[in-house]
Amino acid sequence: MNPPRGMRDFLPADKARRERVLAVIRERYRAHGFDEIETPVMEDYDRLHAGLGGDNEKLSFSILKRGMDADGIRAAADDQAALADLGLRYDLTVPLARFYATHRAQLPTVFRSVQIAPVWRAERPQKGRYRQFMQCDIDIIGDASARAEAELMIASLDVLDALGLVGGSIRVNDRRALDAMLDVFGFAPDQRPGVLITIDKLDKVGPSGVVAELRGRGVNASAVDAFAAYLDRPASAPSFDEAGIRATLPDGIPDEIVAHLVDLGDTVAAARGGEVPLVFDPFLVRGMGYYTGTIFELAHPSVDYSLGGGGRYDGMIGRFLGQQVPAVGFSIGFERIVDLLPETGSEGERSVVLVHDRDVPFAQLLSLKTALIGGGARVRVEQRPKNMKALLERSTADGYASFATVNVDTTPETLEIKPLS
């Protein structure tokens, strides 16, 4: 029997591995001053479909209204909102915005939150894409300055380092810079959503593929020509400073956007001892419709896909609160990070499998087990099988580091613990 499509069971070793990664993430984010919150797995249907979640709204799992009979369901078949009043959350940002609007009076002026919880999307299941998966979000609400983005980046890079994934970097752009760039090239405002979807494919289809698709869209030809010329310009890897950012962008980008990015780079450099693990990417798009400013993605040299990302969404909370509140968030790609880490046991944990003969009294086993647990060990009791090798191999796979054999004469003083490998 398999679980529902796009969802997974986790065997004990897999579950333990995931929990170890989550423990590191929690500990590092807590060390950086973020406080963990919890929100319900469900939100109101209207809130989840308020135009804030982009394409994710189309992937939302809706929950049928209670008490509807067959006639009522048939009558409302063409009206999703009439069928459902609740839905499973498809991300953690919309619930956070609702949470902040609800509890603002009890929260600090600048609120730093951590949310670690499952979300659900009606995806087409495939490798690396699930209908239920874990998200690990940190957000800062109430700070409009670049230091908020810098705090998120520094904390997330620290998580990678703590997990042994050193050498991470962050690609950075600004949605305002993207809009200004499209304006400079001459794309009409109503064309820009489709143009951004095409630009977002640059890594997959290359400059020629993007230009060809833009021409196929029938958008302003002169704007496509200007964009194609921009793509063909000589380019190098610029430094993340004013000169480097301006050299990457076309003329006409507002000074305040560049100044915000420069401030971000300076702040990160100050915290990282002069190191600036940021790369300005004028073609980074990110698809969420609620982003209003800086956007970013976490990269690692071992893979060609991002390990997380986020951005500034200053307009979202105002939709619930009635007044604008600056907000920015970063989501670690937990599932991708877990897949990158080696399948090791519980480092530093003392763990013992007690393998006993059939005639050993249970009270004796419990006495030995209790003594080991009192000394800080994790203990499993197993009756000696015919195939001892298979038992030891399974114990190793389950994360145990040592074993001991027990007979009727064994005492805590005579128990001999041996390594499994």
Image (cartoon, rainbow, N blue to C red):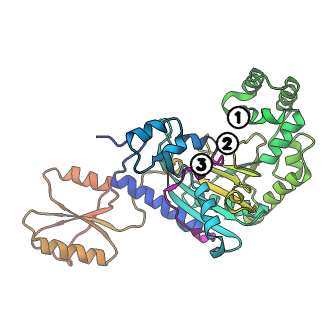
For the point 39% across and 58% down, the residue is 16
Residue 312, percent from left and from top: 72, 55
Residue 61, percent from left and from top: 49, 45
What is the number of the mark on residue 307?
3
Numbered disc in front, either 1 or 3: 1
For the point 40% across and 38% down, the residue is 71
Q: Earlier in the sequence, mark 2 or mark 1?
A: 1
Give the Cα separation between the discs numbered 2 and 1: 8 Å
Range of the magenta residues? Answer: 30-54
Give the Cα separation between the discs numbered 3 and 2: 16 Å
Residue 87, percent from left and from top: 50, 50
Q: Earlier in the sequence, mark 3 or mark 2?
A: 2
Q: Which residue is labeled 2 in the image?
A: 287
Depicted 107 relative to depicted 144: above or below? below
Q: In the picture provided, is 345 more to the left or to the right than 338?
A: left
What is the number of the mark on residue 197?
1
User: What amino acid type is highlighted by mark number 2?
Assistant: Gly
